[in-house]
Image (spheres, rainbow, N blue to C red):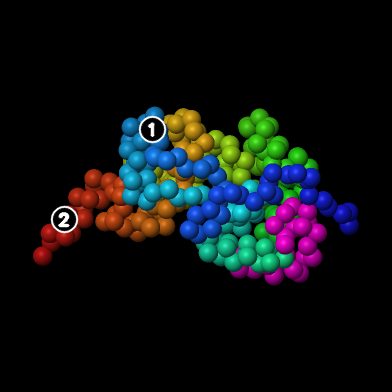
Amino acid sequence: MAAHRDLPGDPGLVPSPRSSPRGPFVGTPHPARAPRRWARDPALERLLRELHRGFGWQCWWPAATPFEVIVGAILTQNTAWTNVEKALANLRALHALSPARLLELEDAALLTALRPSGYFNAKARKLREISSWYLEVGGLRALRERQLNPLREELLGVWGVGPETADSILCYAAGRRTAVVDAYTRRVLSRHELADANAPYEELRSWLGERLCDSQFVFEEFHALFVRAGYDNCKPSASCATCPAATELALHRRDISSNTP
């Protein structure tokens, strides 16, 4: 088997200088105050402003390096983030959070490390595929500098990388303005009657891209706020009473319920 080497001076392996109460994070530093505008669309603007007012800065993506964001984006497929954290801790203990180290790691060790994240056989292959591609294209510099649309199409051609994973990698690891659409995004937008929850991925991504303000911070934070809302309130069974951006209909239903004998 050919030896693998990490790219010299790859910024994707440089530890992030930013930290939050839950640990380091990769992403654009948050400003001293909320952006003057989040979105060109008034309803989306109001929604994001209310979510930010209620939840504050989200400090995303939780990772020590940009390459760890890539690993996390693969591991979070079909599992909760708490399980991802366990797998990342296992990889960190093996000093395997670099593309070359992931490629060199013995199969048994890699599978054992990934077991907490579920689907570990498939995810082991996905991590090896994305690591090989990352080294071949030139690491984080290429992800930051190459033309976005052709790069995204190439990334989508890597085995195991779908649109949500690709956009998470490009937005949070590479700092590119592409909107991440996940289950939380669909749920929040549909419940606020901004978009159809069943709309095709690319349609929702384009819808957001046309309406969000042209700011890398906004593209990162909007998704982080939607995830926070999804974790805390906008679950399959909505918990609107404590949501900082509850819809008028939800508040009306809450009031009716509270006044019912």
Q: Nearer the viewer, residue 125 or 168?
A: 168
* Quadrant placement of the N terminus: bottom right
Q: Which residue is mark 2?
A: 256
Q: How many badges with numbers are in the image?
A: 2
Of circles 2 and 1, the one toward us is 1
* First along the sequence among labels 2 and 1: 1
Query: What residue is drawn where x is 63% and y is 48%?
Result: 66
Queried whether the magenta region covers residue 107, the answer comes back as yes
The amino acid sitting under disc 1 is: Arg
Q: Main secondary structure of the magenta part?
A: helix
Q: Secondary structure at mark 2?
A: helix
The amino acid sitting under disc 2 is: Ile
Percent of width and height locating residue 44: 36, 37
Query: Looking at the image, can residue 6 be seen?
Result: yes
Q: Nearer the viewer, residue 179 or 204?
A: 179
Percent of width and height locating residue 102: 75, 58
Percent of width and height locating residue 75: 61, 58
Residue range (magenta):
95-119
